[in-house]
Image: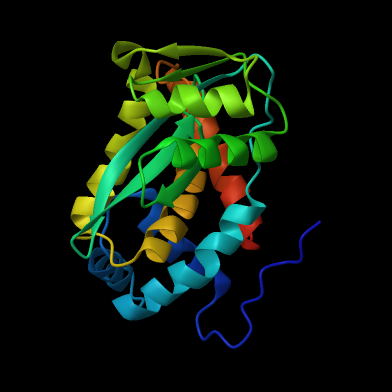
Amino acid sequence: MPKPVSYKRHRFPPEIVAHAVWLYFRFPLSLRLVEEMLLERGIIVSYETIRRWGKKFGPEYARRLRRKPPRPNDIWHLDEVVICIAGKKHWLWRAVDQEGYVLDEIVQSRRNTKAAKRLLTRLMKKQGVAPRRIITDKLASYGAARRQVMPSVEHRSHKGLNNRAENSHVPLRKRERMMQGFRSVGGLQRFTSVFSAVRNLFVPARPYRFALATHTHRLQSMAEWKAAAGVLA
């Protein structure tokens, strides 16, 4: 059981800190927009303070959020997306399951077999169980890496089958535009780890649900978020 989040030496109550961090990572909002939304509620805090809260508490909250248990019949969709940082191309390698749940993501400077192998190795270590199948685009590096890491796993390589992974890039692309790009590789890695954990928690696995089920899911997600942040539900 992890220790409770410490808010020692912070002037604002934990509820305000957790709410500001939630707004920033849950919605496509800039730091200045979060600052303005808090001001409307009578809370005067600078966007720089919100940035520091996100950097300090975001990873702490994400570590405390419940992970989806891995299953041997899962299907992993793998894809990579290019992101420019300081004029240099980097690749964000991502893996999602058949329901769009983000399993892992890692920023790398190469788009080759070594990079694909690193992603698969991390996935196997984190999930603890191999999937039933992996689906990728036509990049040959995936096949070479799969033969080294998980040779018995079925592999389908077809661009049309990998829409699940490609669609998962869309929310991050929206945030990238709102933030006017990322400043460093470390900043991108930290942001995506928290951003995906929050999105996994609040977005229902199946988009076509009854309104009551969606409402119940949101209430449960909010309660879990507050529990991870250590604030009263």
Residue pictured at 45% horizontal, 35% vertical = 113
Residue 12 lies, with reference to residue 86, above or below; the image says below
The C terminus is located in which quarter? bottom right
Residue 195 lies, with reference to residue 118, above or below; the image says below
Foreground residue among 3 and 168: 168
The picture places residue 194, in percent across and down from the top left corner, at 48, 54
Q: Is residue 117 visible?
A: yes
The picture places residue 68, in percent across and down from the top left corner, at 64, 33
Q: Can residue 44 be seen in this view?
A: no
Task: Specify whether 217 is left or right of 48.
Answer: right
Foreground residue among 121 and 34: 121
Farthest residue, direction right: 1
The picture places residue 103, in percent across and down from the top left corner, at 54, 36
Residue pictured at 42% horizontal, 64% vertical = 186
Residue pictured at 72% horizontal, 33% vertical = 128
Residue pictured at 61% horizontal, 38% vertical = 121
On the image, which quarter does residue 183 sit in?
bottom left
Task: Specify whether 40 is left or right of 52.
Answer: left
The picture places residue 141, in percent across and down from the top left corner, at 41, 29
